[in-house]
Image: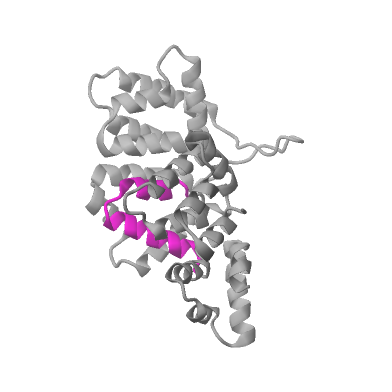
């Protein structure tokens, strides 16, 4: 019963449930894990009772220590406002080394500079336009700034060299909504699509970061559907990583990711979960998918 309630609650609700349980019953809710026999369910129960910022810090630590730039980037580009500051503080639980020093040690200075720029840009959340009935609320985008970046990039691309570093310095200053607008400008101009430019004119680690930024900005649910698919089809699945992927997105867009997964791979993510996992653990993951 407790697990069922936790699986249908948000992170904030779970933290409140744990606080009230501890206060009223005078014992930690976490102690209930001793009644769980399955190792997978045991870990899931722990994750459900742990604040998301701490779980994200742990995932970043695991990704950095294994030099997994793709996973590291996927977490960092999804922060808004003060979310990163909370996770950076929680990172101290896992490492005495400052976060950005860890990034530089494992990925190099240029990667650290680009990722740091991306994170800092997203700390300034875009203002929202007034809601239009039936259309929701849209972010306000500074078109002038985006157009300036477009023409600046055109100058950079006139070079015959690998221009990844210069593109990174400019594109990291755009939030996802500005990135979308830049992509729209490219579509109206007699030049190659922005994604094609990034694919052909960059290389190495910056190539991977810039394409991640592009794919995340243009179609975020599809971006995460692709990441989850690739994790599920590794020879050795990172069960904990997949579990946390689903847990993190369950409050945001997991239902949409499920549909995008079907569109790209011909099978719903929920059916993929049924194929790979079994028993009460599979049922628990499907609960996150609202299945």
Answer with left or right where residue 219 lies relative to residue 167.
Answer: right
Residue 38 forms part of the magenta stretch? no
Residue 71's x, y, as percent? 37, 49
Residue 274's x, y, as percent? 51, 53
Q: Residue at x 29, y 52 (%)?
A: 103
Of residues 52 and 231, the one nearer the viewer is: 231
Q: Quadrant of the N terminus?
A: bottom right
Residue 219's x, y, as percent? 51, 35
Residue 93's x, y, as percent? 37, 69
Q: Is residue 290 above or below residue 168?
A: below
Of residues 190 and 9, the one nearer the viewer is: 9
Q: Residue at x 29, y 43 (%)?
A: 111
Answer with left or right where residue 162 lies relative to residue 33.
Answer: left
Q: Does the magenta stretch mainly form a helix, a strand or a loop?
A: helix
Q: Is residue 6 above or below residue 196?
A: below
Of residues 203 and 178, the one nearer the viewer is: 203
Q: Give the total of numbered labels.
A: 0
Q: Residue furthest right?
A: 133
Residue 53 forms part of the magenta stretch? yes
Q: What's drawn in magenta, residue-wise?
A: 50-79
Q: Residue furthest top?
A: 190
Q: Is residue 21 above or below residue 250?
A: below
Of residues 148 and 60, the one nearer the viewer is: 60
Q: Is residue 54 visible to the viewer in this orientation of the structure?
A: yes
Q: Residue at x 34, y 19 (%)?
A: 155
Q: Is residue 76 visible to the viewer in this orientation of the structure?
A: no
């Amino acid at each position: 019963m407790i697990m069922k309630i936790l699986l249908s609650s948000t992170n904030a609700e779970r933290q409140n449930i744990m606080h009230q349980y501890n206060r009223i019953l005078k014992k930690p809710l976490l102690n209930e894990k001793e009644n769980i026999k399955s190792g997978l369910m045991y870990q899931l129960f722990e994750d459900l009772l742990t604040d998301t910022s701490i779980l994200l810090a742990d995932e970043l630590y695991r990704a950095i220590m294994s030099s997994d730039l793709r996973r590291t980037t996927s977490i960092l580009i999804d922060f808004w406002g003060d979310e990163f500051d909370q996770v950076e503080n929680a990172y101290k639980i896992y490492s005495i080394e400052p976060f950005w020093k860890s990034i530089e040690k494992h990925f190099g200075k240029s990667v650290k500079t680009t990722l740091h720029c991306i994170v800092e840009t997203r700390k300034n959340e875009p203002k929202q336009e007034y809601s239009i009935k039936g259309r929701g609320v849209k972010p306000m985008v500074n078109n002038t700034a985006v157009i300036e970046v477009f023409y600046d990039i055109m100058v950079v691309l006139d070079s015959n060299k690998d221009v990844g570093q210069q593109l990174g310095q400019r594109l990291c200053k755009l939030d996802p909504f500005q990135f979308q607008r830049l992509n729209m400008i490219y579509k109206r101009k007699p030049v190659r699509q922005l994604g094609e430019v990034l694919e052909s004119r960059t290389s190495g680690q910056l190539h991977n970061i810039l394409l991640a930024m592009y794919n995340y900005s243009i179609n975020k649910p599809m971006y995460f559907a692709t990441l989850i698919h690739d994790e599920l089809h590794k020879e050795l699945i990172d069960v904990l990583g997949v579990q946390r992927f689903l847990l993190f997105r369950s409050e945001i867009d997991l239902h949409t990711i499920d549909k995008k997964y079907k569109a790209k791979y011909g099978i719903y993510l929920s059916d993929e979960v049924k194929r790979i996992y079994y028993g009460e653990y599979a049922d628990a993951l499907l609960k996150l998918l609202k299945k």
